Amino acid sequence: MSDFGFLNTHRTWEDWCGMLLGALIVVSPWFPIQDRSPIAGHEMMILNAVAVGLIVFGISQLEYVALQRWQEVTTILVGLWLIASPYVLGYSGEGFVRIYHTSLGAMVVLLGVLQLWQDWDLNDQDMLRHGH
């Protein structure tokens, strides 16, 4: 019988995955297979990607050091913003950037939901012991 106990506990590798996702979001406007140069006329998309990526990276670092629930909720909200941002900021017709941001945003949301589910019943003392 298989045991899914490893999904019941918030592990530090999840925080490292969040940091990696943040770094990927920052560089996403420059991923290969772009339709054209991302710089021309898309300063808002680039600024959004860099800001969201830095937020995801920073929150993941905070979770690694001192875990709190607001970090997981913020991660979910930022991931949802990344999914919606191509449509809100008007670059949904850009092809691969839209796919990148939707996919990366979905991974951020899933990671945040997993971490929130894992930590739902923990008290403040247990959350402070995370990573130690």
Image (tube, rainbow, N blue to C red):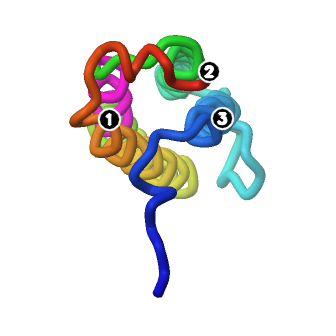
Q: Nearer the viewer, residue 85 or 77?
A: 77
Left or right position of 123 against 44: left
- Label 2: which secondary element: loop
User: Circle 1 sits on which residue?
Assistant: 119
Label 2 amino acid?
Answer: His
Label disc, if present, on residue 34 of the rendered structure: none
Residue 25: say if magenta: no
**From which residue to which does the magenta span run?**
70-80
Q: Residue at x 73, y 46 (%)?
A: 31
Q: Residue furthest left?
A: 121
Q: Nearer the viewer, residue 78 or 125?
A: 125
- CA separation in Å, label 1 and label 3: 17 Å
Quarter that holds the C terminus: top right
Residue 76: say if magenta: yes
In the figure, 78 relative to 96: above or below?
above
Label 3 amino acid?
Answer: Trp
User: Circle 2 sits on which residue?
Assistant: 132
Q: Residue at x 28, y 44 (%)?
A: 117
Mark yes or no: residue 22 visible: yes
Q: Earlier in the sequence, mark 1 or mark 3?
A: 3
* Tag 1 and tag 2, C-beta contact below 8 Å: no
Disc number lying in front (3 or 2): 2
Disc number lying in front (1 or 3): 1
In the figure, 53 relative to 103: above or below?
above
Q: Nearer the viewer, residue 14 or 120?
A: 120
- Label 1: which secondary element: helix
Q: Residue at x 63, y 30 (%)?
A: 19
Mark yes or no: residue 86 visible: no
Label disc, if present, on residue 16 of the rendered structure: 3
Label 1 amino acid?
Answer: Asp
